[in-house]
Image (cartoon, rainbow, N blue to C red):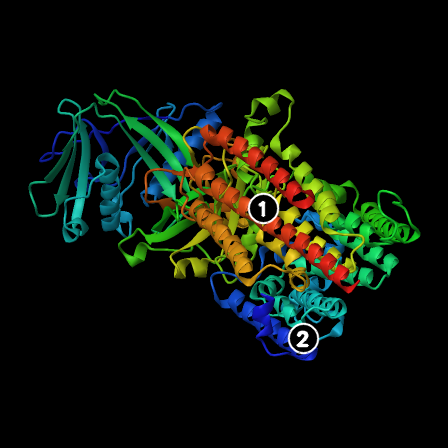
Amino acid sequence: MSKLLTKLPHLSTSTIIITSFLLRLGFLLFGLYQDKYMALPYTDIDYFVFTDASKFVYQSLSPYLRATYRYTPLLSWLLYPTALEDDAFGLPIPHAVWFEFGKLVFVFCDLITGILILKLLKKLGGDLRLSLLWFWNPMVITISTRGSSESLMTCVVLLMMWFIVDNQWSLAGIVLGLGVHLKIYPLIYLPAVLLVIDPHKVWWKCPISLNRLKFVGSAVIIYSALTWTMYSIYGQEFLDEAYLYHLVRLDHRHNFSVYNVGLYFTSFTGHSSLKFLQEHYLKIEQLAFIPQLSLSIVLIPLGVIDQNSTTLYQDLLNSFFIQTFTFITYNKVCTSQYFIWFLCLLPNYLASTSISGLTGLVLVLGWVVTQGLWLLYGYKLEFLGESGIFAYGIWSSSLVFFLWNVVVIGSLIKDQKQRHKQLQQDHHKTE
Amino acid sequence: MDIKFNGKAESGRTNLNQTIFNDFQNQNQAGLTIQVAPQGVRSLEEYHTASKEFIETTLKTLKINPIKEPLFFRKEWYKYHSFDISQFESNDDIVEVSLLRLWLSLTVQELPIHLSNLKTLSSYEVYLDSAKQQVVFLLYWDKITRPQILDKHYKQDIEREIGVFQSMSSEPWEYEPALSGVRFKLPLGVDDETDVKLVPTFLISYPIHNTLFGYATRHEIVQQSSLHPVYKVNLVESAKSNAFRVFKPSYECQLRFDVDLTVDIIVDKYQLGNIRNGPFTNFSIFDDEKMDLELPSYRIDSAGSSLSLILNSTDVLEKSGFEIPLHYRYGEPNSKGVKSIGFTKGNLYWDCPIDEDKKKVKVEESFVNDRQNKLGYERFAENSRLFYFADLDRSNYIALSTPVGNTNDMFVVELVTLSSVVLSLFYLAKKLFF
């Protein structure tokens, strides 16, 4: 991929940012046109969830009055202007324009993510043209201009990464605390970050250091402060909807996850069909956290980050990428929106990869094809109502997608191993 | 109330034993003879009042005005009254209208006479021939010796109920037939000695539920096999003549649609709310818990939901109907992989407000619902009158089916999923550390 991108002419940072902004503006305007004149709406259904919640906030009510709003109230506060009426504050702006404010926020975060990718590439010595994988990626542009809030998370994660690279541990912790408050998943990065803070203090010998305490402490303080504030305003409902729901959710619709059909069955029967699980009153979904968290939080950072490495921050970024990919692969719910979480880390990962163009192409194609297979069966079920398709259709294609993702993760891990080996060899040579 | 038949016969006319209404011009007693002996009242005074009111009402029903005051005859518990038809301004109309009404009520058929002949009809007689099991009409014209005889035979015993009502409505298309009057049955073997009981009847001149004429609906499901079907209600013209095709009963009416849905089917209120420039001006959904679109049907603790729409009637008429997007929840897995579901068709109707003045008039003008409000009129007082669009199809249920998981596959799915996850964990751990 890097080799393909090197064939592109060098573009200045301002050119990249301006063209990206214009692209996003174009998509936004087209989206407005599509919403108004075409049968299939452009705007994401989730955007209506956010803005409806903001309307309730505008009326000094709880955002959780909006069914299926399962986020922190902070998001509905951020999108408060979308609820403003015509000529609010004496400004000649109609409500229809205020309504699009949220998309502008997400596009802004999308661009900030791209700028942070550029800065990290510069800092860590990567080809700046790799940032085009984010800036000019139609999938990325579509997601933010449709009103999906994922660019908020990518912005937060990369900002945290930037502060880490700049050795600003407290600020990194603050951003992590904010990120975990917004969505739980950035918590998986915490152990990996601890490995790169004061790396000379090997974690199993000397786990605690001042800088590590700064990082963890600031994360805990900010997370607690935000969560406590929301709890004091909205009560138990906030905890139930923003956090606890995600532990018991039954999303077996629109879901790539290998667990989805199994969840559907066990949600009906109330128990597993496997005797050894039945005997212990266990269900597969209760055990799903074990491989997911053990891999994404513990094993991958330990296997990928070499505390003696001279490219520690690159290791960290690479670890983030593999951790995120793994977390999503093993999650009980897997939707296309989640792919943005690792896509924002891809340009920086590719800056140091040794995966060949051909191998990369095969991995990407396989990933796309297996997704396409699931989408085909998903379409057959949702829009053609074909029966007999749950197991040998939806589930089997999600299994194939899962297994291919495991192959991808394996390739990424192998890539990092080879990279470390190469670095060691280069280090020995210089010595 | 009792009624006695007045079987007066003149030469050249049929000997009538069972005449109900006798409009003979040459009897010098043209008009109706009604003898009423009201019963079921509590005092003589009430009898007097009730019978007087009954006669007045009956005459009004046939649009005949009395020329004599009712008499309290022979000190019996009845009233006798007759009138002279020649005194009226429109005696021709009286004859033809009363004939038409009687004919229709007894035979439920079109009167086989040309309109021009009907208008020149001078008199008629009606009698029941119980032996032959037929009802006979004898129609007389001036200067024509022989009457035209129209008869209808009944296979079964003749027992027909006739109602004589006063209608407040003067226009044929009005939906408010305020009716007060009497009903009576005509049993077999009616003769001079037979008493026919008259039952005072008040048809509430305030029907809440009406059927709209001229338009009807046809319900269908579009994209039936998908998990996101569309419920389409088509508006069709059911009257051939434009004169009878009235889409909106009155200016203030609101077009509404109500449908009850089972727990297997969802209407997304947010999706409905986002349909711009559509047929819905407002709607409400009643369900027992928050709308969780993701939960399967067996995880919902309610019987379902109800959708009530207020429609843009102009849009509905223009597009000859409207559509409602529906969604199926995932249903209970079973061994067949398919689940039968369905729901009762919704009702499309006009909701028209009724003002208090109109209600009051109807009550006051009814002779049956007197001042003591015996029938408890207030039971029927509503703020709305509803005019329903009839459904052209006989069935009132929409049957559907949806794919569900097959329980026979559960074991394989779980086993292979668990094995794959566990093996992948070992695979990746090996990649990481070995």
Circle 2 marks a residue in which chain?
A: A
Residue found at x 37% / y 53%: B235
Q: Separation of disc 2 and disc 1 at Cα? A: 35 Å
Check disc 1 and give the amino acid type: Val
The answer to whether one can see residue B283 in this image is yes
Can you identify the residue that label 2 sits on? A17
Can you identify the residue that label 1 sits on? A406
Circle 2 or circle 1, nearest the eye: 1
B387 versus A10 height, above or below: above
Residues marked 2 and 1, same chain: yes
B98 versus A41 height, above or below: above
Most extreme residue toward the left is: B145
| Residue A419 x, y percent position in the rendering | 68, 57
| Residue B348 x, y percent position in the rendering | 44, 47
Task: Name the one closer to the observer, B74 or B61.
Answer: B61
Task: Choose top left, top right, bottom left or bottom right for residue A211.
Answer: bottom right
Circle 1 marks a residue in which chain?
A: A
Please state if B43 lies on the left or on the right of A188 as rendered. Answer: left
A21 versus B180 height, above or below: below
Judged from the image, the secondary structure of the residue bearing numbered disc 1 is helix
| Residue B239 x, y percent position in the rendering | 29, 52
Residue B304 is tagged as none
Check disc 2 and give the amino acid type: Ile
Please state if B312 lies on the left or on the right of B16 as rendered. Answer: right
Task: Tell me the quadrant of the picture where the N terminus of chain B can be found.
Answer: top left
The answer to whether one can see residue A78 in this image is no
C-beta proximity under 8 Å, tags 2 and 1: no
| Residue A155 x, y percent position in the rendering | 72, 62
Judged from the image, the secondary structure of the residue bearing numbered disc 2 is helix
Circle 2 packing at 10 Å, graded few (<14), some (14-19), many (20+), is: many
